[in-house]
Amino acid sequence: YDASLRQRRHADRPAPEPLRRPHQPVAPASRAMTPREAAKRRRSNVLFVLALVAACALFLFATTRAEAMLYVFVLAFLALCGYVYVLGQMRPREAWDEPNDEYADVYDVDEPAPARVQAPRVAAPARSSRVTRTHGATDRWSPAV
């Protein structure tokens, strides 16, 4: 602390350090979103909006007993169920389309993967030609089996 009686100017003061709170996270380096990530985000946003509309319509129907809100809820719920069904159908297709990175370094792209080894087939035991029936029960199996 300088207690001298001389006049001070702004230039005499040291520049203040910028305040940085320790709990403020440092912004990570942003990277471009891949088309697959963008589509996934759009799908989750649509799913969230459909669920929110259905929940709000149900709440409004429960509080107001307006018949229109019942119809809005039914439409939103059916749309939500249909969208979940479509997402469920898309998942196996996406899993089939994406490359399996686990073996990407093992197999060359131009080289086909090795064929699977099949277990030897064992002949089924011979069936007797005599069919026994007990108490009038019908035979459920065709003779070709």
Image: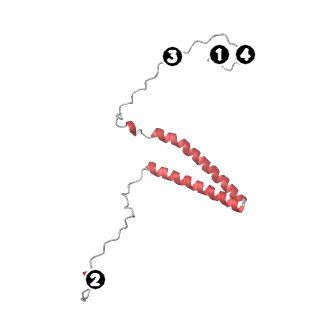
| Mark 3 vs mark 1, CA separation in Å | 20 Å
Q: Amino acid under label 4?
A: Thr
Marks 2 & 1, CB-CB < 8 Å contact: no
Report the label total: 4
Residue found farthest to the right: 136
Q: In this view, does 100 lie above or below 76?
A: above
Q: At which x and y percent is residue 95?
A: 47, 40
Between discs 2 and 4, the one toward the N terminus = 2
Q: Nearer the viewer, mark 3 or mark 1?
A: 3
Tell me the tag on residue 10: 2
Between discs 2 and 1, the one toward the N terminus = 2
SS class, disc 2: helix
Residue at the spot of label 1: 143
SS class, disc 3: loop
Q: Which residue is drawn at 65% across and 53% down?
A: 75
Q: In which quarter of the image is the C terminus?
A: top right
Residue at the spot of label 3: 122
Residue at the spot of label 4: 134
Q: At which x and y percent is residue 92?
A: 51, 39
SS class, disc 4: loop
